[in-house]
Image (spheres, rainbow, N blue to C red):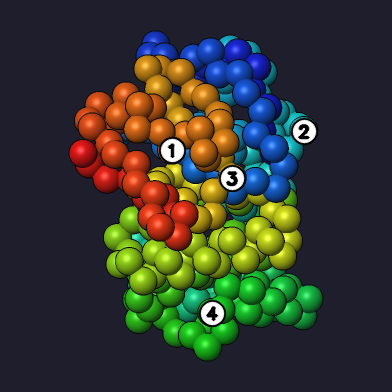
Amino acid sequence: MLELENVSAVRGDRTIWEEGTFHVPSGSIVAVIGPNGSGKTTLLTMILGLLKPGSGTLRVLGEEPRRGNSRIGYVPQNYAAIAGDSIRACDMVLLGLTGTRYGLKRTTASEHARVQEALAEVGATHFADRRMSQLSGGQQQRVAIAQALVSKPEMLLLDEPLANLDVRNQQDIVSLLKRINAESGIGILVVAHDLNPLLSALDGAIYLLDGHPHYAGVDDVVSEELLTHLYGTAIKVVRTAQGDLFTRSA
């Protein structure tokens, strides 16, 4: 899914992180974690081809990153604010197919069929004709994921998709991502502030530590020593009697 060889991220004269060398397996569900300002969103920007590596080689799905790559679906932060209030959910998803067109052009029956398929894929059919302003946060996030999936990408990037959702909606969105991954094999990269809601779904994590990005399997990342170092505060890892993991401040 991702290959980095000695990659650095540079904005202007500032190096955000450097010496990134790792491979992320295809079809994985992977979190991107690190403290604020460590360069998590910068990594997504590079994957999307909007920022070139300062050095090294970055390959995404076996290719150099490029703008407008239809093989990648993207859900940005604050999707609902970007979407606006008056547009309907189904029209937002349609923009995932037609948003790069110039001028007024008739949409095709196959495009409308694909929109309905994407809405059904995320469980959003029953509110497809409602305006975005009428939807709950969890419903808006489903529309965002449908828009990212409508072009049938091979990789899905989500920037803080669980922010501002209550616990139930967080669980619903994580379950949705697990199902999408299991049914389609699509690779999923999720920028996250809190690992706990995602732990049941993750195969691994990219973590930005001391100015360097690393990748490891989830069992190696969910480590008290690593997470305490990463966030600069004491983190305790707890395993329940059922074998589930969660983290908390010590």
Quarter of the rendering occupied by the N terminus? top right
Residue at 29% in and 60% down: 164
Query: Is label 4 or label 3 in front?
Result: 3
Tell me which amino acid carries mark 3: Asp
Whole-number angstrom distance, CA of label 1 to CA of label 4: 33 Å
Whole-number angstrom distance, CA of label 2 to CA of label 4: 32 Å
Residue 242 placement (x, y as % from top left): 45, 60
Left-right relation of 49 to 205: right
Residue for badge 4: 124
Residue for badge 3: 203
Sequence-wise, the earlier of marks 1 and 4 is: 4
Query: Is label 1 or label 3 in front?
Result: 1
Tell me which amino acid carries mark 1: Val
Examine the rendered structure and indicate whether residue 194 appears above or below residue 80: above
Residue at 54% in and 55% down: 201
Sequence-wise, the earlier of marks 2 and 4 is: 2
Whole-number angstrom distance, CA of label 2 to CA of label 3: 20 Å
Residue for badge 1: 222
Sequence-wise, the earlier of marks 2 and 3 is: 2
Left-right relation of 124 to 83: right
Answer whether residue 75 is visible to the viewer in this image. no
Left-right relation of 65 to 74: right
Quarter of the rendering occupied by the C terminus? top left
Whole-number angstrom distance, CA of label 1 to CA of label 3: 11 Å
Q: Looking at the rendered structure, which numbered label has been put on residue 62?
A: 2
Q: Secondary structure at mark 2?
A: loop
Residue at 38% in and 55% down: 240
Tell me which amino acid carries mark 4: Ala
Examine the rendered structure and indicate whether residue 200 appears above or below residue 66: below
